[in-house]
Amino acid sequence: MGPSDSSFHETVSAIFISDDSVMNTIMWSIRIPRIMVSLVAGSCLGLAGALIQISSRSPLGDPNLFGIGGGAAIFIAACSAGLLVLDGFWIFAGCISFAVIVSILLSQLIATKDLSPIKLAIMGIALGSLTVSISTAVISHGRVFSIQVIGLVAGSFAASNWETFYYMVATLGICAGVSFFLSRKFQPIMLGDTLSKSLGVNPVSTRLTAMILVGILTGASVYGGGIIGFVGLISPHLARRLFGNFPSKLILGSIIIGALLTIFSDQVARLIFAPTELPVGMATTIIGAPMMMYLAMRIR
């Protein structure tokens, strides 16, 4: 569905029969890459949300709300504004590097301060607002088109391509494998630092590793679709209801739910006012903001 609609027969033919038709080009150069990138970006955000909630023990944890995605957005803004002349893989690597820097800073904050979930959420949201403001200022300084600003700070998969998908799916596969390997250490972390130490798990190093993974995943998702809020918050909570709270099940469930939630939001944003597209983050915010308020009211 969309500006170039096709019948079911034309769609199937364009997917399975390789030719030079317009519909084949639309399917394999525009629509299928967009679907795949949105699925992988959602999986990255879902896994990052699960890891940040496990490591910080905060039910309000979200990588983009906590400013980790904003670190990657600053780097993309600098590239878009012409302050950095890079292309392809190096932009992807820079997004991950800047996001990891913010995630490490957040990890150190968690380790050195005994913060309640509400205090951590407030500080994280403040950090997120700061990074988004800096990235918006940088990209505005470069006189970049406003649609690019909206796509960066509110999310868009309109520029998806296969190269982006390959970078992201490799990153997701590595981070998911490491997360499953570490899942046996996450259960003691969820019970508190004192108990985890008595069980032979170093909470500081385990939390740092988890937060580095969060930074890598978040940087990859921002590279693919900009800052998309609340997916990392919602996915782990839904996964707990459907799959249970055991870390390995929570990780798997968050990956699946994050992917489905993001592709659903992207299609709603693309079609509800077609041919005009809304930012993906607007659709996820409509779902996520009420849930965050509900969770905040339940925390004592």
Image: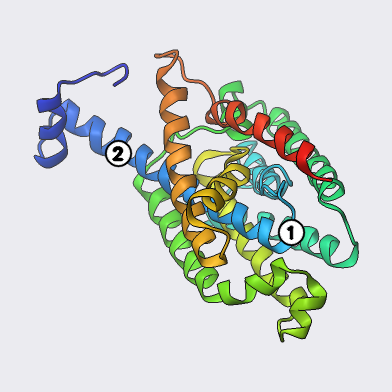
Q: Nearer the viewer, residue 48 or 147?
A: 48
Question: Looking at numbered disc 2 in the image, what kind of residue is underneath it?
Answer: Ile
Q: Position of residue 198 (x, y in %)?
A: 77, 84
Q: Secondary structure at mark 1?
A: loop
Q: Secondary structure at mark 2?
A: helix
Q: Position of residue 58 (x, y in %)?
A: 74, 53
Residue depicted at 18% across the width and 26% down the height: 22
> Quick check: 99 left or right of 114?
left
Q: Which residue is mark 2?
A: 32
> Quick check: 106 left or right of 30?
right
Considering only vertical position in the picture, is 62 above or below 192? above
Q: Position of residue 43 (x, y in %)?
A: 48, 51
Q: Nearer the viewer, residue 115 or 178?
A: 115
Question: Looking at numbered disc 1 in the image, what kind of residue is underneath it?
Answer: Arg
Residue depicted at 71% across the width and 82% down the height: 201
Q: Nearer the viewer, residue 101 or 294?
A: 294
Considering only vertical position in the picture, is 133 above or below 214? above
> Quick check: 123 left or right of 270?
right
Decide if residue 204 is in sight here: yes
Q: Residues within 10 Å of mark 1 (few under 14, many from 20)?
A: some
Q: Which residue is mark 1?
A: 57
Of the two numbered discs 1 and 2 on the same chain, state the one appearing first in sequence. Answer: 2
Colour mode? rainbow
